Image: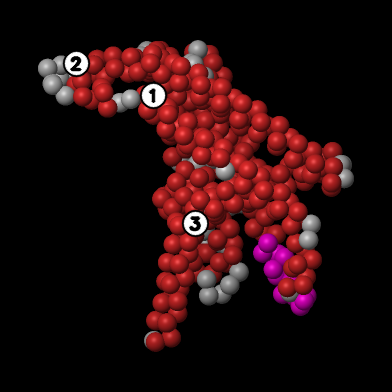
Amino acid sequence: MSGRLAAFGVTFGIAALTTYVLVTGRDLLIPFAIAVMIWYVINALSRLIETHLNFPGWLSLTASIVFFLVALGLIVEMISGNIASVRDAAPAYQANLEQLIERCLKFGGFEEMPTIAYVIEQVDVRALIGGVAGAVAKVAGNAGLIVIYVIFLLAEGRTFSRKIEALFPESDRRKEVQFILSEIQKRTQTYIAVKTLLSLLTGIISYVVLISVGLDLAGFWAFVIFLLAYIPTIGSLLGVVFPALMALLQFGVGSEFLTIAVGLGAAQLVIGNVLEPRMMGKSLNLSSLVVIISLAVWGSIWGVTGMFLSVPITVLLMIVLAEFPQTRPIAILLSADGKV
């Protein structure tokens, strides 16, 4: 009994220490986590080029890096330009918002309430836009550190296999470790590849819907929807709510708002409930409840970045736990069907 209590105490202590490190070291760990995801994307793209175009390894890696940098540059340019446009249009949006609030209050019979003006003053569109711009600037400030991490991860990839051989001289143990690492890489890359493809499809369909009704900054909102699609469950909801609110600010309640809400909602529903389960298959095998819990936990620890990384981190954790008899029951609880 005392041995079990001691083991429980040690486990609880390790969990508490890990949580403390994740929270207090988030400024350093979040850029590293983003760098690892970028490293996975570059490697996956490199293998795709090498397999389908028969390029040598070094050329495939170079091509994937160049492609990623060009895409990143285009995205940064688009975001910076659109943020400036949104700031310029903020006074008009603020006026439309005030009119919308007044109409809603009058419709509810509250036109004599003395707090109406106070409510309107508290909803400051320009302040909200400034906050978004600050968040983007913070990510841009970490870009240099992320790039350094990615460079070192790419450099370490060449010598990693030799390090595994040196760490595990026994053939059986080395093969076991290599299998675990291979499973982690395969499942994570599968998730990233499929999720990126579906997110891109969601963004393209959303852009067509937004541009058809003439919504301002349609390209920017399509890119936001593309990013939000990486967040399980909540991301698809926000991908409809944000552009719909933008339509309210620009057009008011009308056919444009309904077109955006219905069109984006239908796209999210079909892609999330039909295409994604078929394309993902059993590659992740995570319980839906676990996905929601991991989303909440990592979101509380690392904010929005934690929401993006919640599923890959949980998959990695499940694979590792499944390889040890002591922790295998935890991996079974995390899985969707008990097969790990």
> Which residue is at 41% across, 50% downward?
300
Q: Nearer the viewer, mark 1 or mark 2?
A: 1
Residue 191: x and y, percent? 61, 47
> Which residue is at 47% across, 31% downward?
133
Report the residue marked by disc 2. 106
Report the residue marked by disc 1. 126
**Amino acid residing under circle 2:** Lys
**Amino acid residing under circle 1:** Arg
Q: Main secondary structure of the magenta part?
A: helix
Assess whether mark 3 and mark 1 are in contact (beta carbons under 8 angstroms). Answer: no
Query: Is 292 displayed left or right of 197 in the figure?
Result: left
Q: Which element type, helix, strand or loop, lies under badge 1? A: helix
Using the image, determine if residue 46 lies above or below residue 28. Answer: above
**Amino acid residing under circle 3:** Gly
- Circle 3: is it few (<14), some (14-19), or many (20+) Cα within 10 Å? few
Q: Is residue 22 magenta?
A: no
Query: Is 58 displayed left or right of 202 in the figure?
Result: right
